[in-house]
Image (cartoon, rainbow, N blue to C red):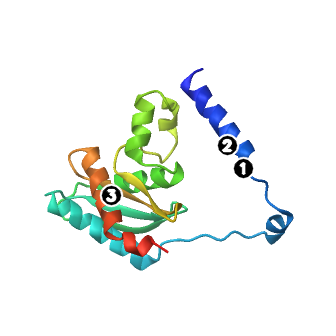
Amino acid sequence: MSPMAAVRATVVAASIALPAPTAAEDAEGLASFDVMTPDTAITLALATLEACREGGYQIAVAVLDRFGQTQVVIRDRFAGPHTVPTATAKAWTAVSFRGETLELDRMIVDGELDTAIRDIPGALFLGGGLPVLSAGSIVGGIGVSGAPEPSIDHDCAGAGIEAISELLEF
C-alpha cells in the first residue's frame, strides 16, 4: 500500500470512528472555541523575538489566530524584507494543516505527503511554523523567519510558546 493510500485509509477509518453529533448538538447551530487574546499574541511574539535575539538572530515573527488571521507581526531591525511574508506564510500553514511546518516538510521529502501540496496558494512548508495549542486545541499559529536555518526558526518559535505556556493552560 502506498503511503498516500495508507493516509487516506487512516483518515477514512478515523472519520468513521468519530461519534455522530447528538440531536441537541445539531440543534445548537453554534460552536464554542478558545482563541488567544491580543495581549497573549503580543506576549508570544515578543518572547519569540527575544529567544531569537539571544541566539544572535534577527527575525520576523507572525502570530495568527486559529482561523489564519494575523494578530501580530514584528520584524527586528535587521531582518530581511522577505521575513515578514515568510513568517506569516509559515504560521498560516501551521494553522491550516494543523502541524509543525518542519515536520510537514519532512513528510513531503519522505514521500508521506504528496509534493503537490506545496502548490497550495499561501502555504509554505519550511521549518519555523508551529500551531499554538491549549488543552489540545489549536488557538493560533506562530511563524518565524530570518535565522540561517529553518530548524533555528522552529526552535525560536517553540521557545516563544514555552515562554507563555502558563497563559495557554486552563
Can residue 82 be seen here? The reply is no
Check disc 1 and give the amino acid type: Leu
Tell me what residue is drawn at x 17 percent, y 60 percent.
78
Instruction: Give residue 66's position: percent from left, percent from top.
Output: 53, 63
Disc sitting over residue 14 in the figure: 2
Tell me what residue is drawn at x 52 percent, y 41 percent.
120
Element assignment for label 2: helix
Mark 3: give few (<14), some (14-19) or many (20+) Cα within 10 Å.
many
Element assignment for label 1: loop
Tell me what residue is drawn at x 40 percent, y 51 percent.
90
The one nearer the camera, 35 or 22, is 22
Residue lying at the far bottom in this picture: please name it.
39
Mark 2: give few (<14), some (14-19) or many (20+) Cα within 10 Å.
few
Check disc 2 and give the amino acid type: Ala
Element assignment for label 3: helix
**Is label 3 in contact with label 2 (beta carbons under 8 Å)?**
no
Residue lying at the far top in this picture: please name it.
1
**Is label 2 in contact with label 1 (beta carbons under 8 Å)?**
yes
Instruction: Give residue 14's position: percent from left, percent from top.
Output: 67, 43
Query: Which callout, 1 or 3, points at the residue further toward the start of the chain?
Result: 1
CA–CA distance in space, label 2 to label 1: 6 Å
Residue beneath label 3, please?
158
Residue beneath label 1, please?
18
